[in-house]
Amino acid sequence: MATSRRQILLCVLVCFLLVEASEGSKARHYKWDVEYLFWSPDCVENVVMGINGQFPGPTIRAKAGDMVVVELTNKLHTEGVVIHWHGIRQFGTPWADGTASISQCAINPGETFIYRFKVDKAGTYFYHGHFGMQRSAGLYGSLVVDVEDGKKEPFHYDGELDLLLSDWWHQGVHHQEVGLSSKPFRWIGEPQTLLINGRGQYNCSLAAHYSNSSSSQCMLRGSEQCAPPILHVLPNKIYRLRIASTTALASLNLAIGNHKMVVVEADGNYVQPFAVDDLDIYSGESYSVLITTDQDPSNNYWLSVGVRGREPKTQQGLTILNYHPNSASKLPASSPPVTPLWNDYNHSKSFTNKILASMGSPKPPRNYDRRITLLNTQNKLNGYTKWAINNVSLTLPPTPYLGSIKHGLRNAFNQENPPESFSNDYDVMKPPVNPNTTTGNGVYMLGMNTTVDVILQNANALSANVSEIHPWHLHGHDFWVLGYGEGKFSTKDETKLNLKNPPLRNTAVIFPYGWTALRFVADNPGAWAFHCHIEPHLHMGMGVVFAEGIQHLNRIPLEALACGLTGKMLMTTNNHN
């Protein structure tokens, strides 16, 4: 079995190299080892999941049109691993999407898998683990795609700064997984620390004591692993801040003292520029903003990150915008920006509604071929707490959908169509009358090149007067965000949809007790996850799977399928040959 898998891997590598040579495209090669490390992300030593001995993982930097080749070796001792390239659409390479049980098998300990894919569009992206809750364990890093040679961005800037935002717990990810799957449900609570580029300061309240000399030591304490990632700038310049959120739970708000931000990009798509004092960013989202360093050059300024959408029990994440030639240890003269109230959703909606596509962006089709309404609910299953979509809590099969659909393995997953909607008499404003749910792993089979509308419908959770924020991420596609609304979506809301200049995104939020309308074209053959990007919610079943045009794929690398029923079939065929 091991010999067969090595032979398959060698064949895949040879095929990749032949295709690369024939295409003549520029390739960016990386060789990565994934392993657990002792690390101090917030000055408290813990165990993190790192790559090549570092946390966060290495930054990938490429140009639009380049090929990225990552030779990934799993050096974990007891668990599989995959990596999802968040925001990269994987046209023609759906097996490289990095979703365990959907696009590929988990990479077993000691094994190597080669990801090879084209980055077709400039923008701000990131990557992260997509097996179990490995993103929460720290498996993530930045992925930046610059414009191709000979092209320019539609805005000017003199320098660039990258910010990768995340949250961090002192209890390990396996502790959290067990608690989420326990009866009764056990929640480890809010994160201990917010991290900026993998660094934070636990139990170090700079915001409350910013003017004290002791806080300066607090800011600068600890090892290089947790020292704040100082942002060095020159006066009177324009800087592009690339901001991505790979948080496992927290919705965030970011602000820079005395500096406005002009939003110019969202999820790898240009938007009509608009200025804000602060910006909300949900898990899975990315933005580019422009700042002008036109403030008093004798001072430094705070950059602050705070929790939104949940009652904050986690201190702000802080670092310094350091104006040259000031010392980076010089604390700002004023206090850090104050994060808006966690439940001020009008503030959040005001920001979100300002995001519109830039001039010349692709417009959505005027009509849809199919509409799928997805009701987001919290439920019970034999006493266990679950999240469900249209009363189905997703449980992934051992055989990846991509291979089982390609090879017609009807026993690999439930062949019944998942529900397209929910009962008209369901009251989204109250806890469910019947909280019980079922599990399932059926697939929404989409017609190739059809236009699909998705209505994300939020509802009350199990407890009264509780409805949570859910940021939803679609793999393999960008979608147009046609609009947001309050209460239950109905036909009268059709007139509110924006077909003129809706933004293209890959992640969109549904606000409490509200709905969000999306539209996309099913033009990318593959099996694609669509799920809440909050890690515990996905772990508890909050997702669906779309599939389209898999029969049009000529070749799927065998190494991506060598597990479950598909693996047994392929290995049998290989041995006979």
Image (cartoon, rainbow, N blue to C red):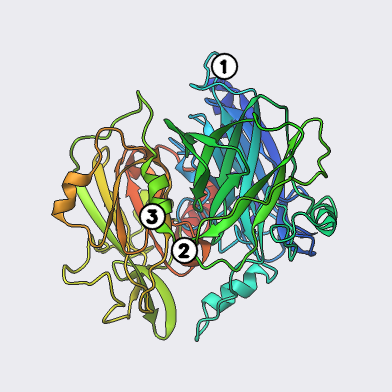
Among numbered discs 2 and 1, the one appearing first in the sequence? 1
Residue pointed to by mark 3: 346
Image-based side of 517 in relation to 225, left or right: left
- Regarding residue 13, the answer to whether it shows in the image is no
Residue pointed to by mark 1: 149
The type of residue carrying mark 2 is Leu
| Residue 278 pos. (x, y %) | 53, 45
Answer above or below: position of 21 versus 506: above
Q: Residue at x 72, y 56 (%)?
A: 200
| Residue 348 pos. (x, y %) | 43, 52
Whether the residues at callouts 2 and 3 have beta carbons within 8 Å, the answer is no
The 10 Å Cα crowd at callout 3, few under 14, some 14 to 19, many 20 or more, is: few
Among numbered discs 2 and 3, the one appearing first in the sequence? 3
Residue pointed to by mark 2: 538
| Residue 462 pos. (x, y %) | 37, 78
Q: Residue at x 70, y 32 (%)?
A: 296
Rounded to the nearest angstrom, the CA distance separating label 2 from label 3 is 26 Å
Q: Residue at x 17, y 48 (%)?
A: 494
Q: Residue at x 57, y 63 (%)?
A: 133
Whether the residues at callouts 2 and 1 have beta carbons within 8 Å, the answer is no
Answer above or below: position of 269 versus 460: above
Pick out the residue farthest to the top.
150
Secondary element at image label 3: helix
Rounded to the nearest angstrom, the CA distance separating label 3 from label 1 is 42 Å
Question: Which image quarter is the N terminus in?
Answer: bottom right
The type of residue carrying mark 1 is Asp
Nearest to viewer (mark 2 / mark 3): 3
The 10 Å Cα crowd at callout 1, few under 14, some 14 to 19, many 20 or more, is: few
The type of residue carrying mark 3 is Asn
Image-based side of 534 in relation to 302, left or right: left
